[in-house]
Amino acid sequence: MQGLAESLRAAPVRPAPWERAGLPLLEGVPSETSEEHFGAEFRRFSLERSKPGRFEEFYGLLQHVHKIPNVDVLVGYADIHGDLLPINNDDNYHKAVSTANPLLRIFIQKKEEADYSAFGTDTLIKKKNVLTNVLRPDNHRKKPHIVISMPQDFRPVSSIIDVDILPETHRRVRLYKYGTEKPLGFYIRDGSSVRVTPHGLEKVPGIFISRLVPGGLAQSTGLLAVNDEVLEVNGIEVSGKSLDQVTDMMIANSRNLIITVRPANQRNNVVRNSRTSGSSGQSTDNSLLGCPQPMEPSFEPEDEDSDEDDVVIEDNGVPQQIPKAVPEAESLESLTQIELSFESGQNGLIPSRGLSLAPAAGGTDSEFETRAPVQKLLEEDGTIITL
Amino acid sequence: MMKFRFRRQGADPQREKLKQELFAFNKTVEHGFPNQPSALAFDPELRIMAIGTRSGAVKIYGAPGVEFTGLHRDAATVTQMHFLPGQGRLLTLLDDSSLHLWEIVHHNGCAHLEEALSFQLPSRPGFDGASTSSSLTRVTVVLLLAAGDIAALGTEGGSIYFLDVTTLALLERQTLSPDEILRSVPDDYRCGKALGPVESLQGHLRDPTKILIGYSRGLLVIWNQAAQCVDHVFLGNQQLESLCWGRNSGTIISSHSDGSYAIWPMNTGSSPTLQPSVATVPYGPFPCKAINKILWRNCESGGHFIIFSGGMPRASYGDRHCVSVLRAETLVTLDFTSRIIDFFTVHSTRPEDEFDDPQALAVLLEEELVVLDLQTPGWPSVPAPYLAPLHSSAITCSAHVANVPAKLWARIVSAGEQQSPQPISSASNWPITGGRNLAQEPSQRGLLLTGHEDGTVRFWDASGVALRPLYKLSTAGLFQTDCEHADSLAQAAEDDWPPFRKVGCFDPYSDDPRLGVQKVALCKYTAQMVVAGTAGQVLVLELNDVPTEQAVSVASVDLLQDREGFTWKGHERLSPRAGPLPWPAGFQPRVLVQCLPPAAVTAVTLHAEWSLVAFGTSHGFGLFDYQRKSPVLARCTLHPNDSLAMEGPLSRVKSLKKSLRQSFRRIRKSRVSGKKRIANANSKLQEANAQLAEQACPHDIEMTPVQRRIEPRSADDSLSGVVRCLYFADTFLRDAHHGPTMWAGTNSGSVFAYALEVPAAVAGGEKRPERAVEAVLGKEVQLMHRAPVVAIAVLDGRGRPLPEPYEASRDLAQAPDMQGGHAVLIASEEQFKVFTLPKVSAKTKFKLTAHEGCRVRKVALATFASVACEDYAETCLACLTNLGDVHVFSVPGLRPQVHYSCIRKEDISGIASCVFTRHGQGFYLISPSEFERFSLSARNITEPLCSLDISWPRDATRARVQESPKLSQANGNPSIILAPQSCDRSPDLAHKGADTPEPPESTLSPMSIDSATSADTTLDTTGDVTVEDVKDFLGSSEESERNLRNLTEDEAHTCTILIK
């Protein structure tokens, strides 16, 4: 059976907010006909409701219909409740097609200009006319919305990692501090904890989280709490280090901070699945929203190092990120043989094809990833759980 | 995943071996003046001097380069020190009444000052635990009897104990109680009063059996030790301070608490002497302070010296620190700026000599040592070749210049000689000449520059062990300060009596804090230097061998660059004097640049080849062409939200005042509460409650723990615009053509790179043509971690740092590779990074803070030469962290090589004062007056290496195996070579014979006397052993064990030979 689709290409809205703490609700309502709204102009075309095909095909169809073959777009549709919902994978595409009644209204926005706030519950009902909403973004600035963006545009703000290799009483939390204005928002203090030693119980000095700033990254994740004992910072044990040292380490790692804590509240610990072991791909899945794991690679932040963040402004006055130098044979001569054998990932020479047999976890940039998929696998052994 | 990420690098044995040949950490020598000295001793036979300090340190000095250091285990004040003449042994008394015997001993070619024995006078039996008894046995004075192996201890209770020095064992039978003395004293003098503590014990030079005892109450007794009887008594009634025995036994001189001294004739009659022949109050008639110490020295040329400290009129000059030197009619009152600790004269001590003939007077003050030449008329002071008071004005910055060309060195030395008021010949009159310096003549001349609070820059010869002052540059003369007339007024007010003479150079009072020197840079090839100060003054100077009179051109540079909304709340800029000014030979100012606002200069650099000086403050940086005397560039680095930058240093002064006020209040409060204590019980209760409440407050503060905010730095943090470093380089900035560039790094991780258009100098000419220099911003790098940029350096195509200006053109350094492939090394407080040039891309990096939790305080590129291979050297990055650790990284790979703990992390001023040299050494202040010298290089070590001809009396002589000096150098510990004098000793007694049993006390000290054989594995008793050192020792343990065995055999061998 043929369905109709109507698509609309939307004008630029406003810059995308960069991070979201949750996932969008991917819902759909069955429909028979699709209708696409396309900018000032509409395209109407038919779809096979029983055999909608794959999302990629549909996406290609839209690009073809609108004659925008090389433009990245966001696709959304109006469900039966009048909500503007995204179409970006097979599931929600099928859902959209199945709920179309009879027309499937599809809204297309240029990706870079997309208004994510347009998506969500009640969007189309509250804004009587979705067109005014989409086309005249100034209108809705008056009332900020709960922003829900597209999954692939999400950036994780925090994650629990290494669940499979850590004791259950510990939690390794990764806080992703991007260009966001949101502060990390926590404080640490000196304290003492009780340890079991060969001499019995002993009080040892430790570092504890003393305060969470309301609205800060640390608080919004819910993964860190006051009185959690900090055990490691980016893999380095803090025992024996002073409060100032730990502070300096955390600030130095603040762009990609990995804190291992012993939570004060041990009741919410991750319960390890018996099937997971060692560095197996699947680790404990405690993702609250059951978000599909395959999305991860796109989330994986390549900027483990803040290197890429260093900016150089040349004569033209345009700030650029500083690329990594690919060591050439010529420049390698200056390094002694010994230095090469000392190669490690985190610091020092940026690995190149020639000498990067070591799993250079630290020096991954996108360019590097494509060249060394083996290492990529090593690094992302699926222990990342995104919340 | 984490396992890989934080994987530690493995060890490559080949590289590890190379590292051992390149790097070794040693604290080698302390330069300057010991902090808080408390005791002084002089050995006239060996001509060595010892200084003890309040922290328990013992330092022995001889000829320049001869130095020994020891530290008591307990950090108690050294109150007295006495040399066993000629033996290289020293008896020290601490304020806990313990006695310690130190020996200059030598272990396997590596010898040092070592504590051999210690002794504590037992409390009187029966009174144990009673506080009175312990104070009664407190040792007040110590006398080493001329025989050499017996010490007499005078105590608070008036008893005198005798001690065998070689074993530190009490000679129980001989104790002399005051009761015994009182028996010889007439009844009417006794009148039931105690004699008081023993105030003075003096031996007789010619008659070793006689001891002169002075009691606090004033009684003087000559005790015959051989006959165990009183020879004579002098019934003094004035409270006694000190005693001195005239050489020819004819007289005794005593000094008293009322500021008088008395001369007692020695008549042989047995009846007590009732009156002194002379009693005078030298600074009377008004009440005077006590004369703490008095010396009597006669001269062959007739007459005698009376030298005493104190005795000043209480009301008018009671606060002066004076030593008076009186000879016949000549009286000079030496007026010092700090408290007098002790003094001695250098004179003949041979018993057969008729006269003392003092050559020199050495006065140890709290802050310096002053030596006067008593043989030259006018008694001029002798410039000290070491022990210089570095802190005569507080040190505000320091810099080291390595490989100073001989020509410049000679010019600086000559400028310094013209400066010193003393005749040059007196430099050779330094009386403390013991020992021989065996260290080789330094291969290169090193100059240490210290900038001071009073606007002076001092030049020190840092080539060897003795830090010698060379030249002092004062910048204060260029400016008008308000303190000048005050000075002249003070001089006019000075009376003729007492005849004061200002001596010494310690002067902690700065005329004007704005004069303080913040940064110094010297071009050693052109003898041009730049001195930058607290009020934004940047002074370019040039060395001139003759005095001149000339005007200094003044320019000002506005670093705010029309930024609006800022008002400078700090100090005014200094106003320079107008017109031609006279300048003595030495560094003479050419150009003065004043920054606006006049904030302290935070970075400065000089390029003499281009005649450019760059300077930065908390507001921005500027570039000045001092040949054309015109500004080239000014750039504001201020963040719009930064308010702190505008306040200037005065706000900090305010807070200091506030805290002072608070502490005064606290004192007043405690005084008030102290008075209350005498009140009735009711108020006592109230007070107790109040005290509880008071205590509760600070308790609460402790309860709320210190917390630290975890937040990345943001662009608008305060003081983000402070310029931290400036750098000139001839490199590739914009394209494939190299040229002059200037680099500036700020507190917020910004780096600005300018391409400079410097007109090329005409071939052969020193000066470039008179055309304007231009600067174009080429690149701006923002480090995202925003940590302060502490250093920038450009590496050439071979990864080596570019040479200094003129260095390559004068064939003093290898020419850099200018074929391209340059890279810039940017060191921030958190990371080191190398970026390629001219296209900026990240090459290598090391994230120090992320890994170690420490922050970079100082960095320097240094060349490390190998001990194994003559011409192998590596250039590395040396770095001092806020934890006081020193790390060394390879360049440009930025691989960590070694790290050592160097400075205590609590010692913030020590860490802040650290300066590295170009050859892997460094200096840091361990006190306001002392630099510790350390070396990271295994080859380039500057340490005391000296010999001392010591001779021990028969029983105490112990044979030492003599070793070649080479061995000690390899070990890297401070070392001396001893040459025990054995010519006049019978060989069978030269070795510690079986007849001398090991004294039981020796078990008190961990290093027993016979442990010489185990000393080649000693882990340096000074306790500066780092983990790496230990590793080294472990690594070579097999070898050392073998040595040990050999040595044991050797010694056994010598034993048999000797005993035969």
Image (cartoon, coloured by chain):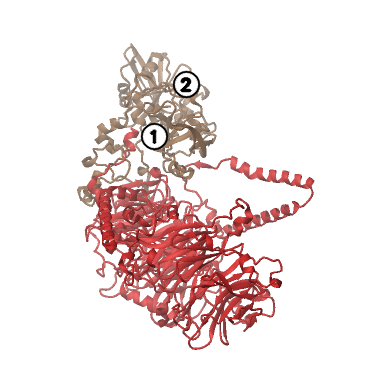
Chain colours: A brown, B red
Classify B853 as above or below B816. above
The amino acid at mark 2 is: Asp
Instruction: Indicate the secondary structure of the residue bearing disc 2.
Output: loop
Q: Identify the image quadrant of residue B1043.
A: bottom left
Mark 1 or mark 2: whose residue is earlier in sequence? 2
Task: Look at the image and tell me whether residue B654 can be seen.
Answer: no
- Which of the image's four quarters has the N terminus of chain B? top left
Classify B528 as above or below A111. below
Judge left or right: residue B678 versus residue A257.
right
Return the chain for callout 1: A
Instruction: Indicate the secondary structure of the residue bearing disc 1.
Output: helix
Coordinates of residue B603 in the picture (x, y in percent): 43, 61
State whether discs 1 and 2 lie on one chain: yes
Coordinates of residue B297 in the picture (x, y in percent): 52, 81
Classify B29 as above or below B1035. below
* Residue on which disc 2 sits: A83
* Residue on which disc 1 sits: A112
Coordinates of residue B638 in the picture (x, y in percent): 48, 55
Classify A21 as above or below A180. above
Task: Look at the image and tell me whether residue A243 can be seen.
Answer: yes
Of residues B719 and B671, the one drawn nearer to the viewer in this rendering: B671
- Residue at the location (28% across, 32% down)? A376
Circle 1 packing at 10 Å, graded few (<14), some (14-19), many (20+), is: some
Give the distance between the C-alpha atoms of the residues marked 1 and 2, in whole angstroms: 22 Å
Outermost residue toward the front?
Answer: B227
> Total number of numbered labels?
2
The amino acid at mark 1 is: Glu
Of residues B352 and A2, the one drawn nearer to the viewer in this rendering: B352
Contact between labelled residues 2 and 1, with CB atoms less than 8 Å apart: no
- Residue at the location (63% across, 41% down)? B700
Of residues B831 and A269, the one drawn nearer to the viewer in this rendering: A269
